[in-house]
Amino acid sequence: MRCVQEPPPGWLWDSPRKSPRRPAPSCPPGGLRSFLLDGGPRGWGGYKGPGGEAPRARRRGARTGQQDSPARSLGTPLPEAMLARLPLALLWSTACWAAQMYGNGGGQYFCTTKDPEYELSGIRVTLGPLGIMRSVQVKNGPSWDTVYGNKIPGKTEEFLLAPGEHIIEMWGSYKAFLWSLGFYTDRGRYAIFGKDEGSNFIAYPDDDQKVLTAICGQYKMLGLTGLIFDWDYIWEEEQGNATAPER
């Protein structure tokens, strides 16, 4: 893994941020269970080729602009009766699966835990001897989540975020399996896991105020076959009360 303070030169930072984005498939009427039984999401692959605006670090203080559409934050309270019937994971997993998958996909589905009390604070991946990305694991606050993918030991690489630091962009490459995964933070830091092989992709939220909060995807026996990135708003405590971004 390489980690530096400034973005490297190359195709990555020729990000297609000004290009029209393809619409994500909508959730089926049958809900999450029906969706998974029918085979789950199938993405279009990733962005490739020249792009437009280069990314830049976006500080937390800049996340106060108007939003195009309202969205429920991770910290928004729900009626107790609803919380008793619906686990927190189910409340957001349908939206996660409706997003674009990067990679060819196929195999078993997974979603990392979206913690209501802690922000995502780290990412860890395991690579096989051939370079295939075997598994992924996220850290929420002080605790590491479950390992998803092939759990056979391999070369492990991780990156820990500083308090108040957030991931605002993801990229990587894939063939039949994921080969590389990188991310860029709102403090100008980045990390790269694995090596660039096959088709490239780049992913970022539809609103500058959103950050990475969870990762979903699929995996087979040898490793990860596709990833979906879940983006949500930051919620901060002000005088003891959670406050949403201004509309």
Image: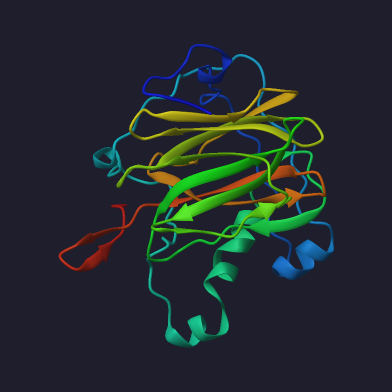
- Between 200 and 1, the one nearer to me in the picture: 1
Task: Specify the quadrant of the image occupied by residue 39.
Answer: bottom right
Task: Specify the quadrant of the image occupied by residue 34.
Answer: bottom right
Place of residue 59 in the rendered image (x, y in percent of width and height, measured from the top left): 29, 36
Colour scheme of this structure image? rainbow
Is residue 100 visible to us here? no
User: Measuring 83% from the left and 65% from the top, which residue is drawn there?
Assistant: 37
Relative height, residue 50 to residue 37 (above, below): above
Place of residue 123 in the rendered image (x, y in percent of width and height, measured from the top left): 51, 45
Is residue 8 visible to us here? yes
Place of residue 65 in the rendered image (x, y in percent of width and height, measured from the top left): 30, 42
Circle count: 0
User: Measuring 33% from the left and 42% from the top, which residue is drawn there?
Assistant: 162
- Between 169 and 69, the one nearer to me in the picture: 169
User: Measuring 65% from the left and 26% from the top, which residue is drawn there?
Assistant: 47
Relative height, residue 146 to residue 241 (above, below): above
Relative height, residue 152 to residue 35 (above, below): above
Q: Is residue 150 left or right of residue 92?
A: right
Place of residue 240 in the rendered image (x, y in percent of width and height, measured from the top left): 19, 68
Residue extending farthest to the left is 239
- Between 43 and 29, the one nearer to me in the picture: 43
Residue extending farthest to the top is 9
Q: Is residue 90 left or right of residue 83?
A: right
